Amino acid sequence: MDDDRTIINPQMKSKLTGNSDLKMSHQSELKVSLFNAKGLLEKQYSFSNKFTVGRSPDNDIALPDPLISRYHFEVSWEDASWWINDLNSANGTFLNGSRIKQRTHLEFPAMLTLGKASIFLKIEAIYPYSTSELNNNHHSALNTGSNLETNQSNRNLSKEEVKARLLSEKEANDSGEYTRIIRRIIHEDRAILKKNNKRFVWIISAVLPLLICVAIYQQMALDNTKKLAIDMFYDIKTLEISLSQAEIKLEENAEVLDLTMKLIVKEKLGAEQEKIQREREKIAAEKLRITSERQKLVSMKNKYQQYVQDTRLFSIRFPSSTQYIETLITKVARGFGESELEVPSDFVAEVQRYIQYWQKSSRMNQAIMHLEENSYASIIINALEREGLPLYFIYLPLQESNYNTHAIGPETRFGIAKGAWQFLATTAQDYGLRSGPLANSREYDSQDERFNFIKATQAGIKHLKHIYSTEAQASGLLVMASYNYGHTRVRNMINKMQETPRERNFWKFIQQNNLPKETYDYVFYIFSAAVIGEDPKYFGFNFKPPLLAHF
């Protein structure tokens, strides 16, 4: 900055300015420099006549800043001098730091600020003197005895030194007029900023306790709602177990009654008819009770879903791919009879790992194609609905056989598993399936009802229902483990756990027991297949959701 190069002795300054008549003997040309908030030059203008400054494009210097008026100020040559006049601007015009209220004479160099706008204008006069005139004036001033002291800062200042000169609370002795104006503006802005910061701190101090209270309330509401939902979930599960057990007992009683009736008809045992009638009435009453309890169960499930919805409202979560997959996993967990609000994060991660296994294989696409081509889905779903079991069990025979009715397993010490549901001969007989003469041979046998998909499906789902209603505590995941590893072995493990549905869930089960890898994989393959089945295209598969397609 040129005005920062020298210090003018006060006595000399008066003598120099005393020659202003000489300077103004001719109209000068003005050089206008535009600086930004950082003091960096952005643009320069030259004027020999009047000019206007403002926001409107038709100004000689147009500055598109909302803090600047459309027509802010005017500079004009009048009475052998340059004058500045504020054009009734909203935020005022400041000349060398002071606001002008009327037409004001300009002395150069002049620093102008426009209200609160973060820009500055420096106006300098370019006088039409000859070199000899300037030299004469200069020598005349020197001959008066005044001194012109060279500023110690003639050297180039470093960035740190410039910053110190402008931001220091104490003004340097060698500061020029431009530097002083810039310092004054900077310090004013800093004062405003400090004031605004105080206001912000006050607002935060007032609002923060309120935000904390809201957050605490929200967390308390979330915890309370979550607890209510979990409690209701296990109430539902207890009722489901009770109803499943009652339905199995009712079915057994009905079978005994039918057998007794056949004996009565055959042997004409009239004395037993009254007793049979009483049993029929008991069975009818039990059916009504179960129907009523089932309706109650539906109402409880609706209430539970409302609680779950409320927990999601109180939870602050942002939509993402990860969240979407987690939502599908918790949905399937709920469908299999596990509390979706208690699904561990490591279980979610494990399911995602098995989803990747399916994605790397063509097996699932081929199996679902086989399911669709043979219309097996409706057969399985209808049987599951009749028994009140989770529809996600449709994926169990996928893992067992890829829905292949002619599937034959390896020979084991327990026998050879056959058919889509991979029944051993002994288990098949327990559920009314005839094995056929080739039961112990790895051959297809048309007489073996394990190869009959409809009959095998009915038997398989009855087997699931039996497991579901006993020690497995209505946990579909424990049911799957029992189906693969053997009901008796899994039941013995479960019996070592606390006898409540809340404690007998799959993740606590695998923490307390060592399952064979085959059974562990078996459960996770079925579960992950069910997750994929909710939105196959999302996971890169080209089939329709089997459950959705049915409805």
Image: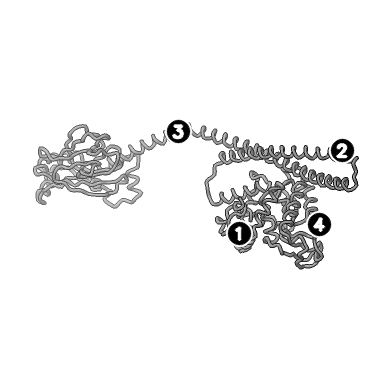
Q: CA distance from mark 2 to mark 3?
A: 85 Å
Q: Residue 211's spot in the image, x, y percent?
A: 51, 35
Mark 2 vs mark 3: which is more N-terminal? 3
Residue at point 34%, 50% (across, down): 159
- Tell us which disc is closer to us: 4 or 2: 2
Q: Secondary structure at mark 4?
A: helix
* Secondary element at tag 1: helix
Residue labelled with disc 2:
274
Residue at 11% across, 38% down = 78
Q: Amino acid at mark 3?
A: Ile
Q: For the residues marked 1 and 3, what is the alpha-carbon distance in whole angstroms?
A: 50 Å
Instruction: Give the amino acid at mark 2.
Output: Glu
Residue 274, image x and y in percent?
87, 38
CA distance for labels 4 and 3: 77 Å
Q: Specify the amino acid type for callout 1.
A: Gln
Specify the amino acid type for callout 4: Gln
Between marks 4 and 3 in the image, the one whose residue lies nearer the viewer: 4
Decide: few, some or many residues near mark 3? Use Cα within 10 Å; few <14, some 14-19, many ≥20. few
Number of residue marks = 4
Residue hosting label 1:
356
**Residue 71, quarter of picture:** top left
Q: Which mark, by number, is residue 429?
A: 4
Q: On residue 203, which mark appears?
A: 3
Q: Secondary structure at mark 2?
A: helix
